[in-house]
Image (spheres, rainbow, N blue to C red):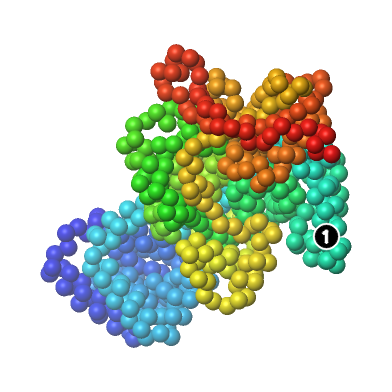
Amino acid sequence: MEIAGVSKRTRLRLAKRLEEGYNCGVTSALRVVSPPAKPLMVYDGDCNFCTLCIRRWQHATGGRVDYLPFQDLQIAARFPEIPRERFESAVQLIQPDGSVVGAAEAVFRALAVDRHGRWLLDWYQHSPFFSRTAESTYHFVACHRTLFSVLTRWLWGRHVERPTQVLVRWTFLRCLGVIYLIAFASLRGQIMGLIGSDGILPANLTMAAATRQVTVEHIGWDRYHLLPTLCWLDSSDGFLRFQCAAGIALSILLIFGIAPAPCLFLLWLIYLSLTSVSGVFLGFQWDNLLLETGLLALFFAPLQLLPRGPSREGPPSRVALWLLRWLLFRLIFESGCVKWLSGDPAWRHLTALTFHYETQPLPTWIGWYAHQLPVWIQKSEAALMFAIELAVPFLIFGPRRPRQFACLAFVALQICILLTGNYGFFNLLTLALCLTLLDDAALQRWLPKWRTEPPPTESSAAQGSEAKPARDSRALRWPAYATLPVAALVACTSYVQLFGMFGVRLPGPEPVLAVYRLLLPLRSFNNYGLFSVMTTSRLEIILEGSNDGVKWEAYEFKYKPGELRNRPRFVAPHQPRLDWQMWFAALGDYRHSPWLVNFCLRLLQGSPEPTALLAHNPFPGTPPRYVRALVYEYHFTDPDTRRSTGDWWRRDYKGIYLPSISLRQTD
């Protein structure tokens, strides 16, 4: 049973015995006559905290160390040389050579049977300061077992064993495959209208201009680094479609677990190729986030060609796991920092959400209802958001329970964002990253039973009839010499980005900055943070066409606000990239959005691919002679207005955004 309410007298007695145990553990020549065949750890079976520790150590040492409570009758009969007081004061390790050590040294020698635990014993043997500190710490913990038992339950829960992430990796990679599938499938239906030969920003013209520039400047192979795209090989419409189709096919292979590492590399390469040639249309933060996640997931994936069950896969790289966790930390923490550091009064006074639901690019109908909430609730939501984004991310580096709390907080935040706004696959990708905060024990309750068979440990593989099948010996993992250089690159870029975010002059060597600049074209080592300065009004561009310059008819987009009766829709995880760019264009002048003028030109030409991105083309037969753009300020209606008129929006005319143009003017 648990040792509760340890008296002062008992603590003094334990302290005396621990002091004796320490001296014996370091210098004792005590030996047993009949040593065990392999190391035997003897502990106090009546102490719950001791039992928790033993479970952890047993998981780490597997079947190479035996564990028995000293209350077992065979212990006293077999090892009469060891007085009972030693067993009561500290754990004792009886070694095959007959020697006996106790307390911290016993723990370190037991853990040293695993190669990952040998460094502790090396430090203990070669550093007097470390050995003294370790024994003093053991002494302190042993005298306060009840306190540390409670803390262990709070911080680790029922599962104190070394966590495994095989099921986590299995689930994460399939979620990432689904997200890649969504991204490529969503883009495939829009790519011809966006960057096709008759699209808004033709890829073939982009590559022709790039070719002229590299020829003039005599740039050789470095062109593939400055503009990393497969379109150097071919920029035709067929090749653009092929890249999207290949991305879809590779995503499906990844979902089924077929050659995950090669698939992840090719998915990263193809998505980088398309983002590099698509300009503003694939320049969103979640496009960069997908590239960074996909690159890091490459080193998290198992090195196998055919799919296997989780129980037959080797453990994932710990370095890659922590790189993904670090990415999640930066994503959430930087999102909070940029809001606060911007100095925007809306964020400082917690009033940003009083208009965010209305002014965000593509709100949902739930966003309309959220906009009607009282101001005090919206201020409370903003305060809670800052707490989640600025404080909770540090729990990622804590024990098991705090990490699970961080996961739940991030999931709740992302679900709220998902319900009130359309941000493509961003929320799904963030939720997938949250999986890396869990372990297999936490995930088992959510997966189907046929997937929740826990991956076998070395201890289970050595326990005779109760053992489960060992992992396939052919299961490979990424070696440290492959993952550590990636970690170094992430450290360099994070160093530059975090110092830059806080406005601190970058100290340190110039090579760090050179590495950062070298990696920029890859879009896979990024900084993050949306809505650093809140948009307080919603300006919408309405495109109109005319044949006589007098009677004008409006083009209707599929998802962005236009007709006042159109209810805001759920679009995500699909991202209508033209609709999104129209929101950004309204924030500035048309001269800052040359793509918009190109779009108007395509409307005048009647190009079918760009007009297919619209919900309603008022000139289906022949294109108009004139096109112009007006700007309106849109607001959500209040509940009374919506009940009486049926309108979700109201608007006020603000002026002409783009004066009337015709093909003759653009020739």
Looking at the rendered structure, the kind of residue marked 1 is Gln
Q: Which quadrant of the view contains residue 640? A: top left
Of the pair 228 and 121, the residue shown nearer to us: 228
- The N terminus sits in image quarter: bottom left
Q: Which quadrant of the view contains residue 324? A: bottom right
Residue at figure coordinates x 52%, y 35% from the top left: 538
Q: Which quadrant of the view contains residue 590? A: top right
Q: Position of residue 649 (x, y in %)?
A: 51, 24
Left/right placement of residue 201 relative to residue 642 reads: right
**Position of 168 relative to 644 (above/below):** below
Q: Position of residue 182 (x, y in %)?
A: 66, 38
Residue at figure coordinates x 75%, y 33% from the top left: 661
Classify mark 1: helix, strand or loop. helix
Q: Position of residue 386 (x, y in %)?
A: 39, 49
Q: Position of residue 200 (x, y in %)?
A: 76, 39
Residue at figure coordinates x 35%, y 67% from the top left: 42
Of the pair 586 and 260, the residue shown nearer to us: 586
User: Is residue 72 visible in this depiction of the protein?
Assistant: no
Residue at figure coordinates x 24%, y 59% from the top left: 146
Residue furthest toward the top? Answer: 644
- The C terminus sits in image quarter: top right
Left/right placement of residue 187 relative to residue 513 reads: right
Q: What residue is shown with label 1?
A: 213
Judge the density around disc 1: few (<14), some (14-19), many (≥20) Cα neighbours within 10 Å: few
**Position of 109 relative to 453 (above/below):** below
Of the pair 16 and 580, the residue shown nearer to us: 580
User: Is residue 426 visible in this depiction of the protein?
Assistant: yes
Figure label count: 1
